[in-house]
Amino acid sequence: MTTRSYAEVRQDFATRIEAIGGDWNESPLVAQSMGPEAVANAISAQRGHLTFAVDVTKSEAVQQRQRAADGIRVRSTVAVRFLARQKRSTTAALDAALDAEVALVAQLLTFDDTWPVYFHVIYTGSDRRALATGEWFDITCSFSVDHRIDLS
């Protein structure tokens, strides 16, 4: 089985999300720093909508037998956080944000020749909130990914 570093897993997810097209674009900031204040400071308001960040938040070994030559099989939690414009708290804006979330999940669960065959990706859930500024929805989708890391 091919190995992937944690950074490569993060990059694979980001590349896959950008392939959705439209307004999806990767944030220059890490997920923990990406919020409504980031739109004013590091991300232009025009690019804020569907700006995302990917983080590998947790990893754990999934087998007892481990050999450096084979790499270690791990299960990582990958979080994808994105912003969607709220547009004066309308239900149409909420529906658009929810549709964007479904498009993201579908993209990450659709396997073809552009997605690493050595990943096993499972959608585990989403957290959604409307930000107090009234301008953005903040959505985080979580995934479980089985992969191997190289120890050599």
Image (spheres, grey):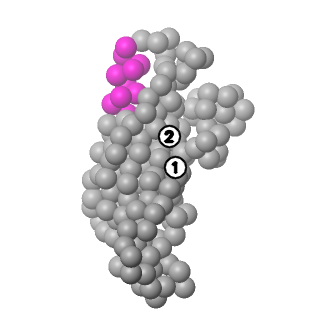
Which residue lies most toward the bottom here? 69
Q: Split into 4 quadrants, where in the image is the C terminus?
A: bottom right
Q: Position of residue 12 (x, y in %)?
A: 45, 60
Residue 118: which disc? Answer: none
Q: Position of residue 32 (x, y in %)?
A: 61, 42
Q: Is residue 113 visible?
A: yes
- Magenta-colored segment: predominant secondary structure: helix
**Type of the residue with mark 2:** Arg
Query: What span is colored magenta in the figure?
Result: 91-100
Q: Nearer the viewer, residue 112 or 3?
A: 3
> Where on the picture, by quarter, is residue 106?
top left
**Type of the residue with mark 1:** Val
> Which residue position is annotated with label 2?
81
> Which residue position is annotated with label 1?
54
**Is 135 rendered above or below residue 61?**
above
Whole-angstrom CA distance, mark 2 to mark 1, is: 7 Å
